[in-house]
Amino acid sequence: MMKALGPLSRRRFLTASASLGIGTIAAPYVARADDPTLRITGWGGKWGDIMKAEIGPAFESEFKCKLQIDSAFPYLPKLQASSRSAPIYDVMHTNSNEQWAAAEMGLVEPKIDPKLVPNLADVYPYAISDKIVGVSIFTSAIGLGMRTDKGYNGVTSWKELWDAKYNGVRGGYVIPVNSLGQAFLMMCGTLFGKGQTDLDAAYMALEKLKPIKIVDFTGAMEKMLLSGEVGMCVIHDSGIYRYDGQNQPTDFVSPSEGVLSLEQVLTITPGSKMKELANAYVNYMLRPEVQKRLAETVWYSPANKKVKLDAKYDAKLLTTPEKVSKLIQVDWKWYNERKDEIDQRVNRIFRA
Amino acid sequence: MQTTASSSLPVAQQAASMPVPGPTRPYGRYLYLAVNIAILIFLLAPIAIVVVFALNPTPFIQFPPVGVSLRWFEKFFASRDFMHALWFSLEVAVLTTVSATMLGASAALALARGNLPGTRLIVATMLSPLMLPAILTGLALFQTYVLLDVGRPTWGLVAGHTLVTLPYVVRTTLAVLHNFDTRLEEAAQNLGASPLRTFFEVTLPLIKPGVLAGAIFAFIVSFDQFPVSLFLVSPGNETLPVTLFNYLKFDLDGTIGAASVVSIVLAFVVVIGLDRTVGLRSYVKL
Amino acid sequence: MSASIEIAGVSKVYDGGVRAVDAVAMDIRQGEFFSLLGPSGCGKTTTLRMIAGFEIPSAGAIRVDGADVTHVPAHKRDMGMVFQNYALFPHRTVAENVAFGLRMRGLDKATIAVKVKAALAMVELSGLEDRRPAQLSGGQQQRVALARAIVIAPRVLLCDEPLGALDKKLRQQMQFELKQLQKKLGLTLVFVTHDQEEALAMSDRIAVMNGGRVEQVGTPTEIYNQPITRFVADFIGDTNIFRGERVGPNLDVGKGLILALPPSEMQSTGVLSVALRPEKIRLSPRTDAAVTAGSCAHGIVENTNFLGGAVLYRVTLEGGHRVLVQQPNAGTSRLFIPGNGVTLEWTPADLVVLKD
């Protein structure tokens, strides 16, 4: 019955259920045409589902506004194509590297004002560090994904990815289009050279990773690991933990050298006509109850120190200062300035 | 002249230009068959893989498949996002087909018959969206809409799709008009039909196969359109290909396969439906 | 009711200055079978298309029964037309094709059905109502086209080389039937053809056209026996044309050949062209008798062309002139073979003096 509902009838259904008092917990706010509209970007998948079903409507109801979430990529080119004075988004949600690119072009404000977003006071330092534009509301940890049924035991170091026994079942990314791949390249410099910016060491390390199966979407890597086509790969923790409860023979390893952070970043556009609402939204997304709900839905580590997750999530996600200290942040500003050169180089490495 | 030209061909080339080898050269025939079968497999393999992906119960592509299940179809049909996208795509494709067909067929008629100055230039301009990467068409339109401050309305998306499907209708209609015997129209007028009546009684029925072929192209190109839609869809109104692309970034499972199967079946149904109702076959050589 | 057509000084000049039709004037009488005859590009089809209303004259006027129709659109002219390729509507059945003009005239279904049936019966196509044109033979298509044109009882029937696509036997049969039909219905019929035999066989009168102009209008016998211009003499049938200087009652055509001019020819002076039809020359075995100056010559048969009912000889005269001679195949007289010496004789009155 529900699946046949169109957008109109869905709204009617929601209105009806609200008037009957069914939806009292997250009473859906029925926006009026003259309500202010906050235009934001947002992910699809489970994140998008819960945003649409709960978090978004609750925000609309509380702030008497309409939330228009664009979950169709690519955000940055669309923002770039629209006018600076009338940007197509008020708040942009995307990964850190794209935020840096946007900030460089002046498309987003580099910092969020703690006076306007009080919850900023409660976030871990990484979330507003100098490696971050705007604020990181969540992070994932990039480490190694493993099959647990192939006898690959006792993995503790990134360097084990180079072990010859993973030839043929090693998984990585198309670096020019994938944040995880880019972060991993920087990690290679740290592992085998003088640090993140030691590109020559990183290129040599990548060269030695071959043979390797590379994909462009992280989702594709998840599936290759699930199907056993790949035995060990670079992946983010939520890409493993989201299959929790399905008894999949896969696990996430946090290497001893540290995990890379994959931040979910919010920024506000300078030309936004909805500044107040935009700040309210950022603050709302940092609220402990909102953070908890989203973190437990998509297995992202919350940025707010005050969030108390259920034990199952608390055990695996980065929820203490000690755990958070293992995060290695990537200098995306540095990386973006060299992106073209790096792209060319890695394309050559993996094409050969 | 003809004879001299062909006899001056090198012997090898003459042999190559001979008709399909008869029973005296069975190997050539087998090779011919093998090549054709290979082409067929190459064309159909992606569809087969998609179907296997859609029916296999595991959330990843697996060979051999471990079973047959409709869970991905259930997930697809239960998803409001997918259902909304599917209907929206159909709506856009139908509107696009109507506008591209009317505009394209009229343009082709004007170009073929109008004695317009610079006809070749106009034809080239009309076909140019085919040469431009569609993503640029989408981006340019998006920028135009932003400049005009009209937002991203559905008609804007339909206009974008119309732009990239127009060339198909213009091309196929021009092709039938090229072979059209204008004496048929004169005959109608001679028998007392006004120009308007002549158009509906004679011209339109006779160019119908070309117009319809263009319309079918327009429908399919619009229904499967990704690059132009990418920039032009508005939040909450995404077409199926865009929704699939976004879904793919987070959940790569059999739902994608199920959606593809549904798309293929739908496109097929529409083509067959159009053929049956309006008639695709041309009656005679014009 | 059939109408008369008056073509008054009509010209057609296309963009780029091509003068397809140049000051053509003729009167086509009511109930007349009138042919426009000429080689391709002579302007005959353009003239027909102007009568039909598909082209608008650059100058001049076209009148039907005295009323100016020069600028009346084609669909209001009430003329039937049979096209060279028939132009049958491929997406309609035979009956629908024939009914088309009646439908455009807003007739009711029952009347249309009756008229279509009658028209198809007239062209002997009853029973083929539901076929599509593509399922018919060339001759059948031709009849459908004819039925479609006459069923509307047009004031004028226009035919653009309607028989050109048929084989010879069928063409002759159709010529006969078309002529019969035209007489029976009393139709004013304008017939375009490049086939002079067809024009001679069918027409009441013929207009011979060349280079956009009318060379001569006349009955078939006038056109054949008294061609006015060198073009007409040359275009209609085989003929021998001589050109020379008038010397008294004779024409000196050079190479020792002197032709006696017809006694009626008095006006022309200077350089003249004359035509002599091959069948007007009599052929006999060469005699040693001296030739009668002006109406006799000796020659040698170069080749022969057996036509069945007649034999066409190409003869080289002693002075070098080449002459065509046609003799009836009477069955009794002996046939000449190449190399035979022959004597040619003709009557000076059969010479026709031509305008250049």
Image (spheres, rainbow, N blue to C red):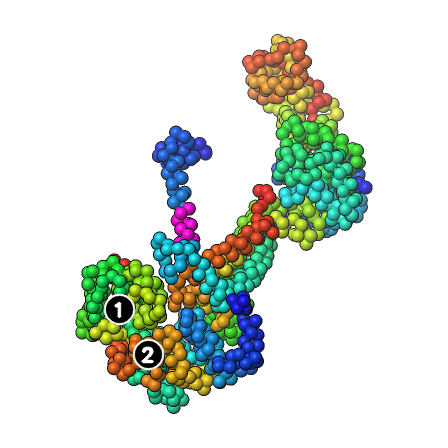
The answer to whether C219 is drawn above or below residue C333 in the figure is below
Which label's residue is closer to the chain start, 2 or 1?
1
The answer to whether B144 is drawn above or below residue C27 in the figure is below
Percent x, y for residue A240? 32, 69
Identify residue type, mark 1. Leu
The magenta span reads B40-49
Label 2 crowding class (10 Å Cα cut-off): few <14, some 14-19, many 20+?
A: few
Instruction: Locate residue A229 relative to residue A202 in the image: left or right.
Output: right
Q: Nearer the viewer, residue C178 or A190?
A: A190
Work out how far the residue at label 2 is from the one at label 1, CA to CA, in angstroms: 23 Å
- The residue identified by callout 2 is A311
Identify residue type, mark 2. Ala
Identify the image quadrant of residue A177: bottom left
Identify the image quadrant of residue B59: bottom left
Task: Choose mark 2 or mark 1, whichever is in front.
Answer: 2
Q: Quadrant where the C terminus of chain C lies?
A: top right
Label 1 crowding class (10 Å Cα cut-off): few <14, some 14-19, many 20+?
A: many
Mark linked to residue B205:
none
Percent x, y for residue C322? 58, 22
Q: Quadrant where the N terminus of chain C lies?
A: top right
Mark linked to residue A144:
1
